[in-house]
Amino acid sequence: MKLLSILAAFAFAFSLAIPCHPPDKPGRFEVSPDHPAIRYSTAETTDVVAALNRRLQAGELQLAFDGPRGYLKSVLDALDIPGGVYDSGVFRDKSSA
């Protein structure tokens, strides 16, 4: 559940970074996110993170908490992201430098 909260917070923060344009801007796409071609709030999500979230909610998978990096390694493994990315220092903890 903690991971779900973290993912939800990340999604919310990301949504705040999307620029908002005034409605009177010429050429702006003026279709509702719930338009049948988009169905943003009703369409089933099929990306790997949504699939991981469904597995977590169904109890098919549990993530392991690992010291100062928390669930990071477990999430990367569940998403099939190679361990070399984790070990390369891309996700290095500031305190370990």
Image (tube, rainbow, N blue to C red):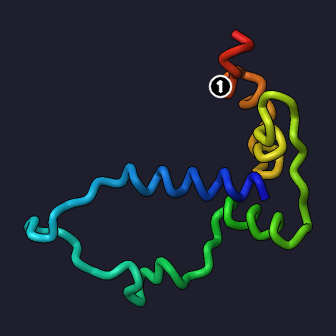
Q: Position of residue 81 (x, y in %)?
A: 74, 43
Residue visible at 77% across and 24% down?
A: 87
What residue is pinned by disc 1?
Answer: 90
Horizontal and vertical percent for residue 64?
A: 90, 45
What is the quadrant of the C terminus in the image?
top right
> Is residue 86 shown left or right of residue 94?
right
Q: Is residue 73 left or right of residue 27?
A: right
Estimate the x, y position of residue 67 in percent, counting from the top left: 86, 30
Q: Residue at x 48, y 50 (%)?
A: 13
What is the residue that sits farthest to the top in this orientation?
97
Q: Circle 1 sits in a helix, a strand or a loop, which is it?
A: loop
Mark 1 Cα shell of 10 Å, populated few (<14), some (14-19), many (≥20): few
Point out the residue furthest to the bottom here.
36
Q: Residue at position x 54%, y 84% from top?
A: 42
Location of the N terminus (image quadrant): bottom right
Nearest the eye: 48 or 55: 55
Q: Is residue 88 above or below residue 14?
A: above
- Taking the spot 91% from the left edge, 67% from the top edge, the residue there is 60
- Looking at the rendering, which quadrant does residue 85 occupy? top right
Does 20 sit above or below residue 80?
A: below
Q: Is 32 on the left or on the right of 5, as rendered? A: left
Q: Position of residue 22 (x, y in %)?
A: 15, 64
The three-letter code of the residue at mark 1 reads: Val
Total numbered circles: 1
